[in-house]
Amino acid sequence: MNLEQLLDSIKTNERFMQNVTHWEIIPQKPAEYEDFPLYLNEKLINVLKKKGIHRLYCHQRQALDEVKAGHNVVVVTPTASGKTLCYNLPVLNELMADKNARAIYLFPTKALSQDQVSELMNLVDAMGEDIKTFTYDGDTPVSARNAIRKDGHIVVTNPDMLHTGILPHHTKWIKLFSNLKFVIIDEVHIYRGVFGSHTANVLRRLLRICRFYGSNPIFICSSATIANPKELAEKLTGQNMILIDRNGAPSGEKNIIFYNPPVVNRQLGIRRSSILEAKNLALIFLKNSIQTITFARSRLAVELLLTYIKEELKKSPYLAETVRGYRGGYLPKERREIERGLRQGEILGVVSTNALELGIDIGNLDVSIIAGYPGSISSTWQQAGRAGRRMASSVSILVASSSPLDQFIINHPDYFFEASPENGLINPDNLYILVSHIKCAAFELPFEDGETFGEKGIDEILAFLENERILRHAGGRWHWMAESFPADDISLRSATPENFVVVDITEGARVIGEVDRFSAPMMIHEEAIYIHGSQQYQVEKLDYEEKKAYVRKVDVDYYTDANLAVEIKVLEEFKQDSEENFKKHMGEVMVTGLATMFKKIKLFTHENVGSGPIHLPPEEMHTTAFWISIPEDIEGLSKEELQSGLLGLCNVMANVAPLYLMCDPRDIRGVVQIKSPFTLKPTIYIYDNYPGGVGFSEKLYDMSRMLLKAARQVIMECSCEDGCPSCVGPYQEVGSGSKNYALKIIKHALSSREVV
């Protein structure tokens, strides 16, 4: 069956349709074209025509014209709309006119860098021009690096390499920085939260070095749809931007289906697992040889889904071999092989984390299945956009989990389709991040007295660093005097640059993957089942000091999931205010996380079949938090009922907050203290799950009433009786009444101004 026939068959399938909460059909859209501009090089036009491009989409032409006028631009159009030409054409046009000109291309991942550089080189080769394009990242051989520094017209890299490998060694890159005409930043919407805040500081350092060498590059940015692309690009680069958001690319008919798994226990509100439902849906398409991508929320979920799909396809061995997994932690060679297999059609299905959400060329997929709401409207559209890269029809199915956020979205399709996507938030002046990059900038070039870094003066920070014997002040300048190399100590993406490697010792010893520091206690503790490419491994030994996990192949019918105990301590309160019958606060906190035990969970049925302790040291993190404290004596609630209600309310608030912040639900966390040592009252804390915080807590502080009202709406609309995973969380006792207790707490908190 082809896709259209399969869709007609699905529409008559009663079991499927009774779980569909919404079926949106986005009609076909024709292209909007404009002619090539007269200033575009004839060679470039001829190559485009040979590739079948006889005119430009209107957004491509607008980008060319704005850049020609010397303006910085941010192009915001959907996946597969030809954004690449918006930056390749102006760059190549300039390089053909001026052989000394240089450009830096920044991509958020190595995979994207390598994918885009091949497209660029095809254009250059077809023109027969001597424009040297090189990828410069951690995989670049040392022997090639000198040639790239000396001769590279276009240097394709990522923010991490710019931070550690290029800026600190700018004296070796004089030709690049003296002649830098363009900085290209692709996938701008990715640069939010801690990663965006770090990258904004890296770009401040880049521009500081450019000024030193006398260049003033134009920024060309591209982004998926978010609410504030212009604001985010301006905050990231520190430059004024022209927004280009009129999409001229054509698109085929898109079917967006919202699917809520059936309830298997009405009283408890428990639904069938989103992973098992996504598996069944993927199999419908895979068995009909329709190329399908399935997105899952976590690395573990990817491996479980992959295991389940391969198990079902064992009756058709050929099909089973054409389904692969894709996630962070796989080695680069394996990921490149999977990308190539998808492009060439050798791989029929892929199960991925959001690693394939970005614009890596993986060919023309027909179906995307999203197992669990990705956490933001923007990410959902990105993942849905992975299907339908031709004028043919495509299908995207969002399969809800039982979380309150998923249930809100799946039951309020109007919110999803009518709301603008979320804002990208960054806080480049977060003190934790800012001080780190001021150290790096001082290592690169001495600071002058009165010099700014970003919008603010930094004299106080420089004086502090002098007291710490890191800088020395002499002759009106601040010089680096420490022995260390500061960039090596700063990871742009997390609190720590340290990864744990996973070593398979079944036969000899070979590295099969890696795990970040904060995930290690949960994923690779001793006795954990680590799944890689649907193959199970048991962790025999975790060498915490050397950051190595030694694993051995096993064949068991369970996987493991760890519990994390979290404690929170207030270090400093920045602000507080009284609202009706509750107090709201915002400040700096220390969060201590300790992996305490793990559960063995049976494959397919997800039953608990055992447990064990985890003996690892706690991880500490300084961050910012928003918290609300309420009176202990709420009428009609005992101490136990109050605790149950607080736990439920905290769960809902932490799950609903991402609707108002452009963040993954895992970017914030909630903790309850029945009697806080700081407020001396029952308190709910919601903290930024990043060292130093990135501004989420402050935004939540300003919208505390709205958050409580949104939590009330989610709880009241849930069809369960006493509370369930879809509202007050999976951690309550059956029939505890926690749903009712949480509503009583909200009613009391808001009661002085309104009747609930």
Image (tube, rainbow, N blue to C red):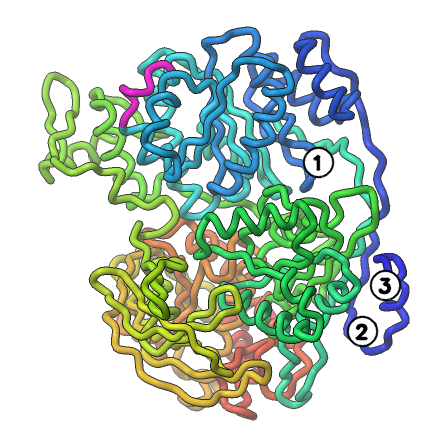
Q: Is residue 555 visible?
A: yes
* Mark 3: amino acid: Leu
Q: Main secondary structure of the magenta part?
A: helix
Residue 187 higher or lower than 752, as above or below: above
Q: Residue at x 65, y 67 (%)?
A: 320
- State the residue position of label 2: 16
Find the magenta span and give its range: 169-175
- State the residue position of label 1: 81
Q: Is residue 105 left or right of residue 80?
A: left
Q: Is residue 686 left or right of residue 307?
A: left
Q: Residues within 10 Å of mark 2 (few under 14, many from 20)?
A: some
N-term-proximal mark, 2 vs 1: 2
Give residue 6's mark.
3
Looking at the rendered image, the disc whose residue lies closer to the viewer, 3 or 2, is 3
Quarter of the image where one finds residue 310 = bottom right
Residue 394 higher or lower than 259, as above or below: above
Residue 172 magenta-drawn? yes
